[in-house]
Amino acid sequence: MDLLFYSFTVFLFAAVILLIEGVYLWWSNTHGKAARRIARRLQVMSGGAGRSGERISILKQRRFSKHDGFDRLLHQIAPLHRLDVLLMQAGSALTVDRFLGCSLAAFLLAFLAGTRLPLPFTLRLLLVLPALAIPYFLVRRARSRRLGRIEHQLPDAADFIARALRAGHSFTNVLQIVGNELPEPLSSEFRIAREEINYGVPMSEALHNMAARIPLTDLRYLIIAVLIQRESGGNLAEILGNISIIIRSRLKLVAQVRVLTAEGRMSAWILGLLPLAVMLMLTLINPEYVSLLWTDPSGVRLLWYAAGMILFGVIWLRKLIRIRI
């Protein structure tokens, strides 16, 4: 009986191990990185769309909401168009109405959390009001990170386009190859430009649209070089090679400047956040001691003076350490 039980346990263990290995091999052969690369190359050779998951609308106007009435209402507000451009440049899947809903939810959560602070209603409202801007700053940060990744991919993209042109491909086919071979997020922008051309948009307009989606000076240089070459001729591969060298040199200089200004940026963060952190700590430890700042008229004036001086100092430090290259 014991021998039969132990034999069954061993065979069951071996069967489970073989099942796991079989599932892993099936997944790697059908959905793994090598399988995706082979499928992508086959689609490129057959003239397919590759890994293009983006689909542009034939309408010029982007939707701000899924509901037609609310979408028309939001389109009548001019600042929301700039917000939609920001969401598009950040590569966010949020629409304008969802972004506004996230901002309102962040404000309500901060207001509910601030009800426990022993502060007057006006001061409590002023403290939780910046929570409305939390989604905005997150989208701005996502936009900066996405544009930074694209900026570092541009030299490789310029070299890739130059090699493809030297190999004899047309520029339209190069857009398709770049969109399938390069990593995200730059490849998706080339695929969108390729799809716009397939829809009948002139190439110059499609490239200008890509420059509007990616507001980078280096990309504008690349697009201007392509458009000038199409109008007047020239060796586009050599021009793109020179542009890639310039972009790499500028990125190297930017990295050196960031290293040299790191101390100033850290000082700005510390000097800007330290007074707020100290005031919050004193409010939690001894609220009666700090309450004079908003109950006494002199304390209120001191608060306004302190806020103005902190804001002036942060802006001044930002001007000092912000070096455009």
Image (cartoon, helix red, strand yellow):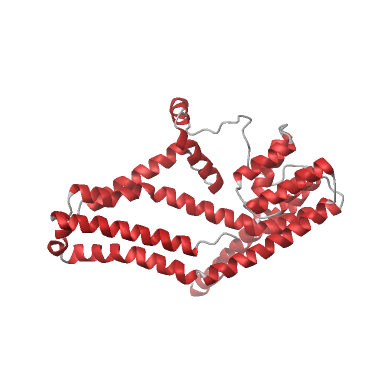
Quarter of the image holding residue 243?
A: bottom right
Look at 31% across and 56% down and name the residue there: 308
In terms of depth relative to the viewer, which is nearer, 298 or 154? 298
Vertically, is 6 above or below 43? below
Residue 210 in sight from this viewpoint? yes
The image quadrant of residue 26 is: bottom right
Residue at left offset 52%, top offset 69%? 9
Which residue is at the front of the view, 123 or 320?
320
Q: Which residue is outermost to the top?
A: 69
Q: Relative to 28, say whether 57 is above or below.
A: above
Give the residue furthest to the bottom: 3
Residue 14 showing in the rendered view: no
| Percent of width and height locating residue 314 | 39, 61
Residue 28 percent location from the top left of the image: 66, 58
Residue at the image point whose x is 40% and y is 40% from the top: 100
Q: How many marks?
A: 0
Locate residue 320 relative to residue 252 in the image: left or right. left
The quarter of the image holding the C terminus is bottom right
